[in-house]
Amino acid sequence: MAMGVSAAERCNDFGWHPRGRIDPALVAETAQRTRFGFGHAWSRSAGYSLTTAPERLYLVLTMEGGFDFTVDGATVSAEPGSLILLDGEAPTLARTTTETARFVWYLEPTFLRPGRSRFRYGEPITTSESAVNVLTTMTNSLLRTPPPATADSERHLTLAFENLLASVLDDAKPSHRAAPQHRDRLFMAALDAVERGFRDPAYSVGRLATEISVSQRTLYNTFSSMGTTPRREIERRRITEAIRLTEDASLPPAECAELSGFRSARQLTRALHRSTAP
């Protein structure tokens, strides 16, 4: 297992490019095959930019500590026990918020491709312990074994991992549910806060949680019980405003995007694509 600068070089080769000071306590172990890679790491602090690769899916399982991910300009926080899927096409930054242990993967997906999968990208998912144990055990085993001898065996291994990942996502459940009456009040209070703040491009799930005085985990669980997520609702409100401005005023796309809370017309276009994907 590499440490310090050597570990940072491994992360860089893996597609996680270090930003800022290298943590001398960083430890990382990674392996890469033709179509997928896997590993785990621990650090006191670290920041990265991920390689932009349209054919790639990134995954991060936060075991302890926490991560902030900035995906295409929008920031979400991942707590211990959460798994996040990241679209390799979207510009992504990652930063640990404290001492953090994590498993990391990437692959060229088949049925888990963005727009074709029912699972949401860029949003932390609370995982079940049993399914995660299988996933991490398989990863640790692969780190200790030589690569597949043939292209066919590697293809089968990649598909097996993708199916295992899908089982982890299917087993994912919120850690608790609020009482219906409390949940409804909290949901409506959150929507009111979104209505006040969505035009600010810096408005995030973390800021929403602070404004209504709950943890981000409670916020995600409340929105999950309503069949949505806080990030999705912030984005939905921005999209609605952008469409209204497009229809009601002769404004260029960049200005419509800015007035709606998007950082750019490109970010608005990506959001529109996500909102219409199956």
Image (spheres, rainbow, N blue to C red):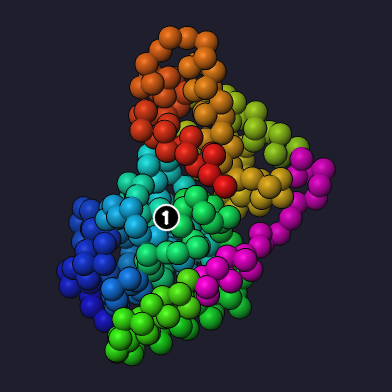
Of the residues shown, which amino acid type is indicated by label 1? Leu
The residue depicted at 32 percent of the width and 67 percent of the height is 43
Task: Kindly state the secondary structure of the residue where label 1 is placed.
Answer: strand
- Hey, which residue is sitting farthest front in the picture? 152
In this orientation, which residue lies closer to the viewer: 133 or 63?
A: 133
Nearer-the-camera pick, 115 or 210: 115
Q: Is residue 179 magenta?
A: yes
Res 166 quadrant in image: bottom right
Asked if residue 166 is positioned above or below residue 174 in the image, the reply reads below
Q: Is residue 189 magenta?
A: no
Of 251 and 278, which appears nearest the observer? 278
- Specify the segment rendered in magenta: 163-184
Look at 43% across and 9% down and name the residue there.
Answer: 250
Mark 1 surroundings within 10 Å by alpha-carbon count, few (fewer than 14), some (14 through 19), many (20 or more): many
* Above or below: residue 130 compared with residue 94: below
Q: Does residue 44 appear to the left or right of 274 in the view shown?
A: left
Query: Can residue 145 be seen at all in this image of the molecule?
Result: yes
Residue 187 placement: quadrant? top right
The residue that mark 1 highlights is: 86
Q: Is residue 24 visible?
A: no
User: Can you tell which quarter of the image residue 58 is in?
Assistant: bottom left
Q: Is residue 163 above or below residue 54?
A: below
Question: Could you say where residue 180 lies in the image, as x and y percent from the top left?
Answer: 81, 47
Q: Which x, y percent locates residue 93?
A: 33, 50
Closest to the observer, 253 or 230: 253
